[in-house]
Image (tube, helix red, strand yellow):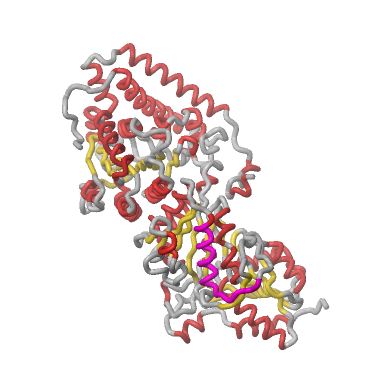
Amino acid sequence: MSAKRASPALAVEKKHAHHLLREMIRIRRFEEKCAEMYTATKIRGFLHLYIGEEAVAVGVMQSLTAEDALLCTYREHGHALVRGVPARSIMAEMYGKLDGCSRGRGGSMHLFDVSRRFYGGNAIVGGALPIAGGLALADKMQGRDRVTAVFFGEGAVAEGEFHEAINLAALWNLPVLFCCENNQYAMGTALDRTESETDLCVKAASYKVPAWPVDGMDVLAVEEAARKAVLSVRAGGGPAFLEFKTYRFRAHSMFDPQLYRSKEEVEKMKTERDPIHLFTDRLQAEALIGPEEIAVMEKEIAAEIDDAVDFAEKSPWEPVEELGRFVTSEEAR
Amino acid sequence: MSGGSAPVKTNYRECVRAAIREALQNDERVFIMGEDIGRYGGTYAVTKGLLEEFGNDRVRDTPLSESAFVGAGIGAAMGGMRPIVEIMTVNFSLLALDQIVNNAATYLHMSGGQLNVPVVIRMATGAGRQLAAQHSHSLENWYAHIPGIRVLSPATLEDARGMLWPALEDPDPVIIFEHVGLYNVQGEIAEDAGPVDIRHAAVRRPGKDISLISFGGSLPKALEAARLLAGEGIDAEVVDLRVLRPLDTPTILASVRKTHRAIVVDEAWRTMSLAAEIMALIMENVFYDLDVPVARVCSREVPIPYPRHLEEAALPQIPQILEVARKMVSQGVNHG
């Protein structure tokens, strides 16, 4: 499998192309609104924005079915949105409100929607990787051909849990899709400042896991790579590892002054590598979309986000009396 | 609950094995995994023979990757299985703390009640086998500190045999501590012994003069101390905590209300221990029932050393319990 597309012509039909674009813009606009609401102190705590990395979640999700499981990091708003978690319940969660997808208890870093097999934002780097192996093991032992996709940053590759989990998945031939979102900085530390081997695919391959680097700014390249990897995983080929080379346009979190990278570097990436701009330009070049269609798309997305904010604003707070609920199932009854 | 069938001779290890075996037989969602549990037969030989009987799929040897296989147990539980994860010793469980504390214990609450984690994690704990400072510690209180998990400490053959099944039926994570000093304990148990209660403490010996509150590997010491005290005319009650989280506070308090004196015997270090918690509970709730201040007999605050004489000196021993008990009884007001 190659990360590069064989043909320069877009092998994508119009309706699907619009869907991909729409999903990326949904994430972008949703998160821009989150940043605004953070500044307005409606959202508190940590807020980690995915802006710049949208093509990864959108591209991978196209190959996952409703039966497949998904585990993410604390930078997971986009994944949740594309998975189908309603924008309303995500925004309410960010507000910490009762109608949030985790009753407001998790906030930005801990979106959960078990009905959609969305097993959370995990705020421990690498912490979701062993869990992914377990979900996949359960599927394998119960004879289901489901895939568990786990997203993590390149920082997680330095954690022991990455190595333990990928070894176990390979050893037991578990249906796990390892999606490494390499945005080049583990919080504020560049990969070459922390890793002796910066080629992450080499690490995965050393566990006999097929591994491919992918241009994470090209939604079609992501989609194609994920499609092939998921096919192999679902067919019983064992785990696969995809390294999506991407870039975070915003700070690590809202507290980050970004002293570790230059403004020029960020501007260059925004100008030259923005996944939404790149894809829009390609679609326009092939007359697959026009300005009016984009305007309609933007308008519909804006309406969805306004509705989400309105919903979050109106949602009640969980009564303090319920603080102790769900510590254990007994207390939940 | 155990029936009235004839008692059979057995030991603690065989009771644990019988419980695992029965769970594997009764529920196809159950499987067991851990280091050296299959081909080797288990470090403490608990799982001996299970691989041959149930096969590689349900008796899984794991790499030495505590975080990965404990996490896999959590994930498999989320995926509909009922995993039993064996960790070789509590000291090694520290390598899986992230999975237990950050994931297993938090998921239900953090997800707003959506996500149950019905995993059972068994591990050996405690000292007494000259295994030195990285295989001998008693860290039950670390886990008993964490909301969201149930912590069990089977100290009798019945509990070794009967706690696993209800633990597997619990929709939440359960940790079972098996004290290494108990594996060879022999005794008799009803042939059809089965599930036991995992909610309450148990009074193992009723008495009226003093309460010896203990659990796990310290329980036999407390019982022997009570037997010796009886020879001196001191009638000690022995409370086996059994469930370390959530604590069965009413049983503890009822005993102290009756005897007016209490010693907590806990193999952990005294500072920040379960003993400290139980003393605090007694002070908060039945202070005015006490004739003398609550006492505790715990381990010396040293990493557990290798040579037998030093190891023994580091651990709670029967003479210490006797000495403290005699002193407390001789000091106390007699309520009659």
Magenta stretch, overall SS:
helix
Can residue A127 be seen here? The reply is: no
Query: In the shown orientation, is residue B259 left or right of residue A161?
Result: right
Is residue B324 a member of the stretch shown in magenta?
no
Which residue occupies 64% across, 82% down?
B225
Is residue B7 a member of the stretch shown in magenta?
yes
- The picture places residue B226, in percent across and down from the top left corner, at 68, 81
- The picture places residue A161, in percent across and down from the top left corner, at 35, 54
Frontmost residue, A168 versus B136: A168
Which residue occupies 48% across, 69% down?
B124
Q: Quadrant of the C terminus of chain B?
A: bottom right
- In the displayed orientation, state which residue is furthest to the right: B336
- The picture places residue B139, in percent across and down from the top left corner, at 50, 67
Frontmost residue, B336 versus A130: A130
Query: In the shown orientation, is residue A297 left or right of residue A243?
Result: right
Magenta stretch: give its range. Answer: B6-25
- In the displayed orientation, state which residue is furthest to the bottom: B232
